[in-house]
Image (cartoon, rainbow, N blue to C red):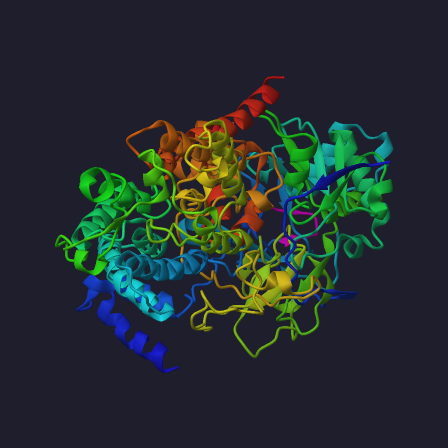
Amino acid sequence: MANVIKITKGLNINLKGKAAAQVSAVPASKVYGLVPDAFWGMKPKVVVKEGDEVKAGDALFVNKLHPEVKFVSPVAGKVTLVERGDRRKVLSVQVEAAAQQAYVDFGKKDVKSLTGEQVKAALLESGLFAFFLQRPYAVVADPNDVPKGIFVSAIADMPLAADIDVVLKGNEADFQTGISALAKIAKVYLGVKPGSSLASTKDAEVNVFDGKCPAGNVGVQINHISPVNKGEVVWTIGAEEVVFIGRLFNKGVADFTRTIAVAGSEMKTPQYKQVLVGAIIGDIVAGNVKTDKKVRLIDGNPLTGVKVNEKDFLLAHSTEVTAIPEGDDADELFGWIAPRLNDFSVSRSYFTWLQPKSKEYVLDARVKGGHRHMIFSGEYDSVFPMDIYPEQLVKAIIAGDIDRMEALGIYEVAPEDFAVAEFVDSSKVELQRIVREGLDMLRKENE
Amino acid sequence: MGLKKILDNLKPTFSEGGKLSAFGSLYDAMETFFYVPNETAKVRGAHIHDAIDSKRSIFFVVIALIPAILFGMYNIGLQHYQILGEESTFWCKFLYGLAVMLPKIIVSYAVGLGIEVTVAQWKKEEVHEGFFVTGILIPLIVPVNCPLWILAIATAFAVIFAKEVFGGTGMNIFNPALVTRAFLFFAYPSMMSGDKVWVNGNYIDCINGAPAVDAVSAATPLGQLAAGEAVTASPMETIIGTIPGSIGETSVIAILIGAVILVWANIASWKIILSTFAGGALMAYLLRYDGAQNFEWWEQLTVGGFCFGAVFMATDPVTSPRTEGGKWIFGFLIGAMAIIIRVLNPGYPEGMMLAILLMNVFAPLFDYCFVQSNINKRAKRAAK
């Protein structure tokens, strides 16, 4: 029987426009783009030239710090553009898809007969290693580290997030192969929902997490199972990315087809779409976005995602594309004292507590208040289910006090762990940005 | 909408480079008072936010104070006419109280907000709404006969030296409203200390600072206790609040209504309120009078500023501990210390103000203990 861990703190935000469990394919985009910014903490070195022909699985850029970590093309075709921004920063590497898809053949392998080193080498070669994130710092993993564990969360409880059951449907065998492959590198910990069919996954320690968002955050799960101490490293990878790994060994190709949710109150028909990493957002949401008001498209969920427009490319780790009202033309009169019956709040000064739990909310992108110093205490703590004092940690980061950040547990967190706290904060502090800066600051200091 | 248009048209005048840019933060304050800012989330980070903001939270404290304010006004009139020995109607009493109270509220807000807006303008920040609570708390905890000019000086002192020098709302160490009272207490002791100055028969005359002709005094229960006299007010009277005292502090019922609002809206910490009463009750029981003064030990919690302090002062989120464990200790020690000062210190009949200010100093220490134990646990885990 799997270990059940109860998470008491947290908050489920019930947004309108959850994806219906129907999956359809998206017509192929003309151009696909791999965006280096999706792999945080990496310096890209482009290894192709405009005009080069690539197959799906050929490297487009590598990590300057660890050239063995490759970032490979999701499609076969011709490299059309290396898009650069200020100071020649690489924004994306774009590949025009060929009519006929061709994959680099990495060879089918039986995971059982491989060693950890062989698995790692196969992942590096095929570009799949790039999907590993590491704690500390929540950045792309370093292949020279020996992780004390690999953590996979099979719970997606952020608002509007793609349901893992739908995403993994039909990919169960690849998922198991992927987990077995990871187990060769280090001990694998899999976090699942109560009653999940994934509880029977082999080659992994399965823990059941029973609680509200952010119980599905892998950081919360690590903190409850095996917290990261200074000097230790753990790797994390998304459940759908484990499927990519399984495909590599079962089929011998790097196939980045994934099922994402296309959701949110401003989608006409929220649903699941089968897409390739790097597809154009506009192709994924084509004809599905409501046009009666200004809409914000988000690559990812509304708590942790990135604001994008239709011309952008789907980021590597994205499991959903969501659309919410922008709201910058709302001009709401006396909002600070009005009853605001349709708005959502954890505060009982609103009437959310009177509404049925099943009520779905349409929330726009407004911050809904002025930025203040932290005034009310305990707000972050009530939605931060880790053995860490979130407010004190954030203050240490703002002060730039490196010793104190370390002492308060910065090695255990990622910006996404503060997403719900950022939502409930009445002082409207940009917690995720601050934590990101703190992690980057510490990483620079320790290098 | 018309109002929005007017505000938008005025905006350039108040913006940087405009004619009235010196009043920019005042304009900002007005604009955000009317309209929720249309500012939307950045490219990265949470794209949706809870509807709560500090304006609403802080305004709810003012709402929670309304019962105490209204009762305080009525009680001013009641005490006035009682002392004069005249009969009067309910409305007459209330209007008399309103007439006494209103100038104090206006002075407190005008002085405090004036300073806040000036500082905000100087620092090029938004005006923070914290003073909306402080500004109404100040008239509620000063003696009825406090002259307005002294009130203005005390308010200015508190806002500048207890709040703005630390960085404004959210950064202060001491509760600014209590600093106002402490300032009066130590700078103008003739107005504040002793046992019979809390109330004075002829308030209106006192507003201008002129000594009241034929002033008649009434003693508060704590004043009587300190003087070793028998307490004249019955427990029922102290709970309803028809006794002399500072304007907002007398009615336990009105304060408890406020407490329910604050705790329900999650704005005040119930842990602090509960532990303050627990600490006060324990100490009052240990140091109880032996019945000679017709005063039960638990009545300590119903008289003076104990309830008001526990509900509205100790729970100030900025000056109380940030950790949940710290809140329990903080409250308990406030309650205990308030009673110790009352009973064991012959100089000060009332101990609540000093107890809270003292514990404001210690709040970071309580937090330190809890945060440090978390740090030690982590260090120990890493060393293994």
Name the residue nearer the viewer: B245 or B164.
B245
> Can residue B213 be seen in the rendering of this structure?
yes
Q: Is residue B244 magenta?
A: no
Q: How many marks?
A: 0
Q: Name above or below for residue B380 compared with residue A117.
A: above
Q: Is residue A58 magenta?
A: yes
Per the rendered image, the range of residues in magenta is A53-61
Q: Quadrant of residue A117?
A: top right
Q: Name above or below for residue B137 compared with residue A218.
A: below
Left or right: residue A133 versus residue B319 is: right
Q: Quadrant of residue B70?
A: bottom left
Q: Position of residue A77 (x, y in %)?
A: 66, 58
Residue plotted at (21% across, 60% down): B204
Name the residue nearer the viewer: A16 or A181.
A16
Q: Position of residue A88 (x, y in %)?
A: 43, 50
Residue plotted at (45% across, 72% down): A332
Q: Quadrant of residue B356?
A: top left
- What residue occupies the far left of the structure in this picture? B210
> Can residue B17 be seen in the rendering of this structure?
no
Left or right: residue A69 versus residue A205 is: left
Left or right: residue A395 versus residue B324 is: left
Q: Position of residue B154 (x, y in %)?
A: 22, 47
